Image: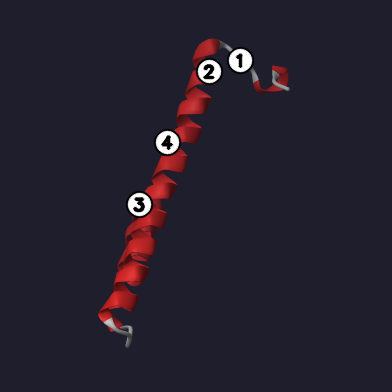
Amino acid sequence: MAWAGFVIAILFEYIGLYTLKEPLYVKGYYAIAAAFLVVSCFVLQKTIRDNEEDDYNLGVSPSSEG
């Protein structure tokens, strides 16, 4: 479900850009912004996962932090 939602969102984003009645440089700006948002979401998700995995491997429990 998560991958299907992701693919549908990306598809609709780029369909919207394709049908946008603006010059090509405006469409390009929005396309690059959308691509940057997708990449930054993947990086954030990976960073959070890696931090949780590190805590698990080091034996740090959430209640003992802070």
- Asked if the residues shown at circle 1 and circle 4 are in contact, with their CB atoms under 8 angstroms apart, the answer is no
Instruction: Label 4, secondary structure: give it.
Output: helix
Residue that mark 1 sits on: 60
Which amino acid, by three-letter code, is at mark 2? Answer: Tyr
Marks 2 and 3, how far apart in space? 26 Å
> What's the residue at 42%, 48% (across, down)?
40
> What's the residue at 52%, 26% (across, down)?
52
Marks 2 and 4, how far apart in space? 15 Å
Instruction: Label 3, secondary structure: give it.
Output: helix
Q: How many marks?
A: 4
Q: Is residue 38 left or right of residue 60?
A: left
> Which of the two labelled residues, at mark 2 and mark 4, occupies the earlier sequence position?
4
Q: Is residue 1 visible?
A: no
> Which of the two labelled residues, at mark 1 and mark 4, occupies the earlier sequence position?
4
Instruction: Label 1, secondary structure: give it.
Output: loop
Q: Is residue 55 left or right of residue 10?
A: right
Residue that mark 4 sits on: 46
Which callout, 2 or 3, points to the residue nearer the camera?
Answer: 2
> Which of the two labelled residues, at mark 2 and mark 3, occupies the earlier sequence position?
3
Q: Which mark is residue 34?
A: none
Q: Position of residue 61 (x, y in %)?
A: 64, 18
Q: Residues within 10 Å of mark 1 (few under 14, many from 20)?
A: few
Marks 4 and 3, how far apart in space? 16 Å
Q: Is residue 65 left or right of residue 58?
A: right
Question: In this view, which residue lies farthest toward the top?
Answer: 59
Q: Is residue 11 above or below residue 23?
A: above
Residue that mark 2 sits on: 56
Question: In this view, which residue lies farthest toward the bottom?
Answer: 21
> What's the residue at 33%, 83% (across, down)?
20
Which amino acid, by three-letter code, is at mark 1? Answer: Val
